Image (tube, grey):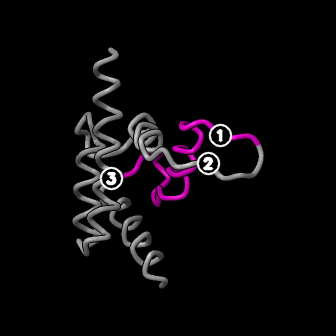
Amino acid sequence: MIGTKLTFVTLAALAGMASATAMAQGVSPEVVAQRSFSRADTNQDGKLDLAEVTAMVAAWNAPPPATGPAPSAEQRAQGWINRNDADKNGSIDLAEMITTMRARAAKAKGN
């Protein structure tokens, strides 16, 4: 169980690092989304559930917002899903991940 959890978190960390590095190198948001999604979708069911997104958020190791008590990685993951889950089914599919990465790239460019 511990090995599985470590692998899950390691894959999620790689997805986060890969997306930031790839976009900085000019790789399209669509390619970044596909790579990140496939690394994070550890059960290969075609969607990112709360556990998979929680592992990604924990691996990003970014500080939580500075207002109020610090939310857990799971609370932050649920917030990320809520913001990016266009069809409101409780998970993120590849199309939603592409939309998210496009928005992230546009924001980074100042658009």
Secondary structure type for disc 3: helix
Secondary structure type for disc 1: loop
Residue contact at pointers 1 and 2, CB within 8 angstroms: yes
Q: Amino acid at mark 1?
A: Pro
Name the residue rendered at 28%, 29% in the picture.
7
Q: Amino acid at mark 2?
A: Pro
Along the viewing direction, whichever of 88 and 82 lies nearer the viewer: 82
Along the viewing direction, whichever of 5 and 47 lies nearer the viewer: 5
Q: Residues within 10 Å of mark 3 (few under 14, many from 20)?
A: some
Question: Which of the 4 image quadrants contains residue 23?
Answer: bottom left
Name the residue rendered at 54%, 36% in the picture.
74
Quarter of the image that includes the N terminus? top left
Q: What number is the disc on residue 7?
A: none
Which residue is outermost to the right?
Answer: 68
Q: Which residue is mark 1?
A: 71
Secondary structure type for disc 2: loop
Q: What number is the disc on residue 17?
A: 3
Q: Residue 109, relative to residue 10: is it above or below?
A: below
Q: Residue 66, relative to residue 111: is it above or below?
A: above
Name the residue rendered at 49%, 83% in the picture.
110
Sequence-wise, the earlier of marks 3 and 1 is: 3
Q: Residue 78, relative to residue 20: is it above or below?
A: above
Q: Is residue 55 magenta?
A: no
Task: Write down the region rendered in magenta.
Answer: 69-93
Q: Is residue 81 magenta?
A: yes
Name the residue rendered at 31%, 59% in the picture.
19
| Percent of width and height locating residue 6 | 33, 26
Is 111 on the left or on the right of 68, as rendered? Answer: left
Q: Which residue is mark 2?
A: 64
| Percent of width and height locating residue 87 | 45, 57
Which residue is outermost to the top?
Answer: 1
